[in-house]
Amino acid sequence: MRIIPIHASAGITGFESPASEYLQLALSLDELLIEHPSATFIGVATGDSMQGVGIFYGDLLIVDRHETVRDGDVIVANFNGEFVCKILDKPRRQLLSSNENHQPQPINDYDSFSIEGVVIRSIRCHRQSPLLAGK
């Protein structure tokens, strides 16, 4: 992967071409974004309930099952047979949205609830990927 540093000066002298220098990093996007490959999956966000934390419809969610879940984490959970992406409020046993149009969802003893993993990254595609078309 090549990183092209762009350093623009506020003076009138201009700046050299960003392509004149580049750094070669010994990283792949997998290495940069995924910490535990065997415990990670990618999901696609739907809905508008997590816009306040920067997760929008169609964003890719990198979900790590190896991470220890902490209060306030953005998680993917199976809640009564439906996969949801929410903020975990452990002390109050509820799932929170980051959009004021959605109410907190209590986790009751009779609910079917399992945490599938912690959302460690989200990615916004500005053009739809052919690999995700139709999904």
Image: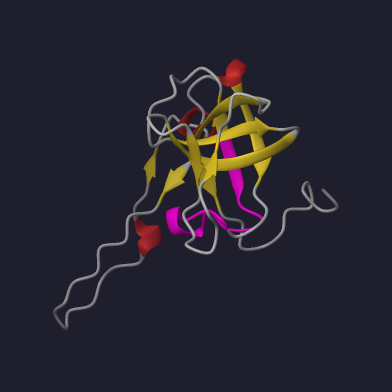
| Residue ID at (61%, 56%) | 125
Is 120 magenta? The answer is no
The image position of residue 130, as x and y in percent, is 79, 52
Kindly indicate the quadrant of the structure image that contains residue 112. Answer: top right
Return the residue found at the far left. 11
- Colour scheme used in the picture? secondary structure
Range shown magenta: 49-62
| Residue ID at (68%, 53%) | 46
Image: 2 above or below 52: above
The image position of residue 67, as x and y in percent, is 46, 21
| Count of marks overlaid on the render | 0
The image position of residue 20, as x and y in percent, is 36, 58
In the image, 87: left or right of 110?
Answer: left
In the image, 116: left or right of 5?
Answer: right
| Residue ID at (36%, 62%) | 18
The image position of residue 17, as x and y in percent, is 35, 67
In the image, 89: left or right of 40?
Answer: left
Image: 74 above or below 22: above
Return the residue found at the far right. 134
| Residue ID at (55%, 49%) | 123
Is 52 magenta? The answer is yes
Return the residue found at the far bottom. 12
Between 47 and 37, the one nearer to me in the picture: 47
